Amino acid sequence: MRVLVIEDEPLLAQTLRRGLELEGFVVQVADTGTDGLWWAIEDSFDAIVLDIMLPGLSGYEVLRRLRAEDVTTPVLMLTAKDGDYDQVDALDLGADDYLTKPFSFPVLFARLRALLRRRAPQQPAILSAGDLRLDPARRAVYRGDTPVALTPREFGLLECLLRHKGTVLTKTDILRNVWDAHYDGPENVVEVYVGYLRRKIDAPFDRGSIETLRGVGYRLIDPGAGEGDDETGSTPA
Ligand code: CA
């Protein structure tokens, strides 16, 4: 899940980045309205966190131009209690939700998750494949009734695979969604993390749910595919 944070206060921007990364999001920060607008139009994100008082263009102007360009990415606006603007303006201009500063991180994460769910209503709140279940809101993973503890990165990788279950994801797709577009670490990082995941969600349970397609990528096998509840399995590769 990729989130664009448009916020000019360095401390808040860094705190948001760190907090969201710990929740398994990939984060791009822009510190002016102009940069933020550029990122939002040129790249693609699952959600945008947008401050109002920004150098360059105000958050309102960024939002107005985004909607004028038909960018429909959900926007969560950060409003100041005593600002010149209010929440009504934000919603009128096409924001999907707003939070008044100062806000608590658990509330921010919950609102973001709600926006992402609203955007993809066909996606159930709990992602699953066979007896493997992942609850994005509670950050919990189960194999059958057994809870499985994952690091944030492992969690992000599994969430990405589950959201595209039955579909082949290339290493580039995975890097982009779970690391970020500018990742320049070792190239085998995806392989390494798929290995970590297999050791936690598959090996102890004698399963093999992540298929390697050599030279192509990875696919999370959907045991339910072809049984009538197959939505993603029929997606053309
Ligand atoms: Ca600001």
Image (tube, rainbow, N blue to C red):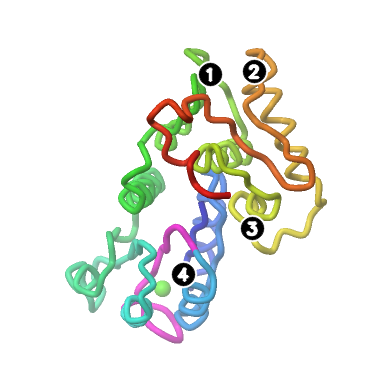
Mark pair 4, 2: CA separation: 44 Å
User: For the residue marked with disc 2, what is the amino acid?
Assistant: Arg
Residue at 25%, 66% (x, y): give it.
Answer: 81
Q: Which residue in the protein does label 4 denote?
A: 7
Upstream in sequence: badge 4 or badge 3 = 4
Mark pair 3, 2: CA separation: 29 Å
Residue at 35%, 74% (x, y): give it.
Answer: 52
Q: Which residue in the protein does label 2 denote?
A: 207
Q: Residues at badges 4 and 2 in contact (C-beta under 8 Å)?
A: no
Instruction: Please tell me how many numbered marks the rendered image carries.
Output: 4
Q: Is residue 199 above or below residue 127?
A: above
Q: Is residue 29 above or below residue 46?
A: below
Q: Give the magenta range.
A: 45-60
User: For the residue marked with disc 4, what is the amino acid?
Assistant: Glu
Q: Residues at badges 1 and 2 in contact (C-beta under 8 Å)?
A: yes
Q: Nearer the viewer, mark 1 or mark 3?
A: 1
Where ligand 1 lies, by quadrant? bottom left
Secondary element type, mark 1: strand
Upstream in sequence: badge 4 or badge 2 = 4
Mark pair 1, 4: CA separation: 39 Å
Q: Which residue in the protein does label 3 denote?
A: 180
Upstream in sequence: badge 1 or badge 3 = 1
Mark pair 4, 3: CA separation: 19 Å
Q: Nearer the viewer, mark 3 or mark 2?
A: 2
- 137, 176: nearer the viewer: 176
Upstream in sequence: badge 1 or badge 2 = 1
Upstream in sequence: badge 1 or badge 4 = 4
Q: Position of residue 74 (x, y in %)?
A: 35, 61
Left or right: where does residue 114 sit relative to residue 231?
left
Badge 4, how many Cα within 10 Å: few under 14, some, many 20+? many
Q: Which residue in the protein does label 1 denote?
A: 143
